[in-house]
């Protein structure tokens, strides 16, 4: 099924190039009939939108893991801080309200299962094989390594591991996602099948 967006995607706050979104959609489309999809780092639901629309086509589902407290770069005073997502009463970042709004607008509430928790906590009891994992959470080396170690092993054979924010040099961007990409390739368990902008798609052998 070709991608039909329910509203202009630039009305959703986030950090995903439309071509990256389409690549996620294409792979999710193939994978969703084979098992659940899971993303780490949903923010306001831009990537979730593409994964969710693909999953909905086949009656599949997406687990969307995010504590919704923002990464380092979203905190007050940091470069990607968005004051509209700051809950002043609680003195904390909160993207969950906006995330839910995206799900509702896109009619994805029956397809996406929000997991409002840190990725490591969510992983601790995880037992379900996954058809596709998209890693786009914290970008410190510790956070990226933890996401890779906690989740890559749940990707079933033939499934997809997608990693966002891959930059070839430190001048163009942080290197933690690239470090886990290298680990995945060195493991011998994954092969690279596609790259679109900063998104790399790996397939579990
Ligand atoms: N995929 C989104 C962008 C994600 S931004 C898009 O398409 O626009 C990164 C997100 O990761 C933030 O919302 C932040 O709250 C979340 N995050 C960072 N560290 C996390 C962790 N340890 N566990 C869960 N979520 C985390
Ligand atoms: Mg990203």
Image (spheres, rainbow, N blue to C red):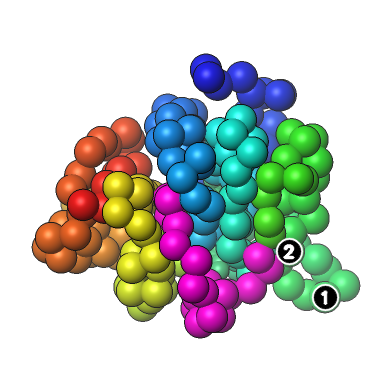
Q: Give the residue pinned by disc 2.
A: 94
Decide which of 39, 164 is in the foreground and name it. Answer: 39
- Please say whether residue 33 is visible from this viewpoint: yes
* Residue 175: % across, % down: 26, 60
- Please say whether residue 82 is visible from this viewpoint: no
Q: Give the residue pinned by disc 1.
A: 90
* Residue 92: % across, % down: 73, 72
Q: Which residues are magenta?
A: 115-133
What label sits on residue 163 in the rendered view?
none
Asked if the residues shown at circle 2 and circle 1 are in contact, with their CB atoms under 8 angstroms apart, the answer is yes
| Picture quadrant of ligand 1 | bottom right
Within 10 angstroms of label 1, few (less than 14), some, or many (20 or more) residues? few
* SS under mark 1: loop
* SS under mark 2: loop
Residue located 27% across and 37% down the image: 195
* Residue 172: % across, % down: 27, 48
Within 10 angstroms of label 2, few (less than 14), some, or many (20 or more) residues? many
The answer to whether 29 appears left or right of 193 in the picture is right
Whole-number angstrom distance, CA of label 2 to CA of label 1: 9 Å
* Residue 142: % across, % down: 36, 77
């Amino acid at each position: 099924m070709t991608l039909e967006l329910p509203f202009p995607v630039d009305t959703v706050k986030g950090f995903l190039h439309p071509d990256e979104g389409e690549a996620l959609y294409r792979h999710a489309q193939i994978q969703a009939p084979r098992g659940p999809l899971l993303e780490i780092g949903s923010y306001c639901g831009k990537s979730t939108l593409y994964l969710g629309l693909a999953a909905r086509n086949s009656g599949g589902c997406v687990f969307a893991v995010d504590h919704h407290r923002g990464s380092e770069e979203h905190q007050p005073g940091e470069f990607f801080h968005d004051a509209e997502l700051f809950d002043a009463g609680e003195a904390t970042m909160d993207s969950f309200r906006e995330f839910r709004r995206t799900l509702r607008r896109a009619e994805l509430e029956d397809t996406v299962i929000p997991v409002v928790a840190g990725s490591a906590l969510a992983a601790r009891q995880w037992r379900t094989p996954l058809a596709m994992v998209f890693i786009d959470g914290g970008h410190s080396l510790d956070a990226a390594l933890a996401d890779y170690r906690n989740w890559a092993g749940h990707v079933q054979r033939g499934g997809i591991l997608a990693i966002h924010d891959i930059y070839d040099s430190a001048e163009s961007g942080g290197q933690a996602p690239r470090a886990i990409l290298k680990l995945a390739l060195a493991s011998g368990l994954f092969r690279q099948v596609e790259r679109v902008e900063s998104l790399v798609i790996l397939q579990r052998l």
